[in-house]
Image: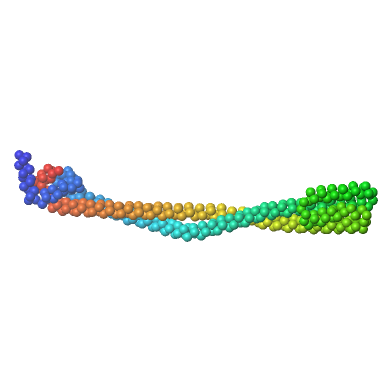
Amino acid sequence: MKFLVLLCIVTLTFADSRIDFFTKLSQSDFGKTILQTIQVQENNVERVLQFIRQLQVDINAAQTEHTNYLQNRNGQITQYINEADQALAKAKQQKAQDEAQLPLREEELNDKRAQGESKFAEKQRNLDRIATLTAEREETKKAYDQRRTEIVGLLAALNQGKKLIQQIKTGSVFTQQEIFADIEHHHKKFIQRFPDRRGFNSLVSLSLAMAQDSTLKSDQSALERVVQVIEDLADSLFQLQKQEMEADDAREAAFQQAIARLEIANQSLEGAVAYLHAQILRLEQSLLELQNDIATQAQMIVNKQNEKADWLNIQRDETKSYGKQTENRKSQLDLLGETENVFSKGPLTPEQQSFLQHLK
């Protein structure tokens, strides 16, 4: 019996457009929802049409709401993209400005370092010069002291020789012989002490040799001449001693002036080096900050590019989703329009109602 009913329904299907439409509804999820609603209305056309029209209103409202949302959303995304573009442009501009400043800052820093090294090297040269002048002055002092000691020794030898010669005038023959022996001994000691026979050494030695002439004890005039030679020689040595002292005083004054000039120059250089050092520290800090800002702007550029790309992807995805949902709603509205058209023709026939109730 059931087979016969189903057979009748199938037969009617090929001859009834409504049944064709009901079959079409059963082939989609939304169509099945419509079918379920129609089935529970038990062929109440008014209720079915009311349901369909309300559903059409709801779908159109949903489409309008989605359209408005997408428009607002696109406006927001466009604003975010514009803000990202502005931040991106600002970061690129700042990075370009920083990069343009970088070689200038580096050049300025290198210049200050070179100046500092030059001033420090000049100060060191002055210190080396002070050391050299001090060593040279020590050598000239040593030579002067040696020369002064030598002159003092020569004067002492002359004075002793003169003293011995003057004793010849008043001494007895026996005493004179002892005096000549003393002069000879004195001469030998002089030669041992002053072996260099040049200059005044030779003259003093010669005067002491003259004092050993035995004829002096009987020739007073010759004796006086020897004494005069010794006195003249002593005067010359006194003058030489004075000249040596003045020359050494001049060397000392020149040395002190040179040292003073170099020390004053180094004081000025110390100030210049300290000032340059402070500038170098400031420039190093400024250069570091500039390099950090370049790195910061580079990271900002990457971040804003990624941010812009993310917003563009979101906009593309939401627009794509909107298109799919719009297409889906259009299909739903088309299906509801067909349903409305079917039921606008009146109630279902018993055969159509029977087919509808058995349709799943």
Q: Position of residue 7 (x, y in %)?
A: 5, 44
Q: Nearer the viewer, residue 244 or 87?
A: 244
Q: Could you say where residue 116 lies in the image, as x and y percent from the top left?
A: 59, 56
Q: 173 or 198, which lies in front? A: 173
The quadrant of the rendering that contains the N terminus is: top left
Which residue reaches farthest top? Answer: 1
Q: Quadrant of the C terminus?
A: top left
Q: Is residue 315 left or right of residue 1?
A: right
Q: Is residue 20 visible?
A: yes
Residue at the location (40% across, 53% down)?
302
In depth, the one of 188 and 135 nearer the eye is 188
* Apparent side of residue 61 relative to residue 218 in the rendered image (left or right): left
- With 107 as the anchor, is 11 left or right in this view? left
| Image coordinates for residue 176, horizontal then vertical, percent | 91, 49
Residue at image position (83%, 55%) is 206
The image shows residue 152 at horizontal and vertical percentages of 82, 52
Identity of the residue drawn at 73% across and 54% down: 140
| Residue 76 visible in image | no
Q: Nearer the viewer, residue 230 or 216?
A: 216
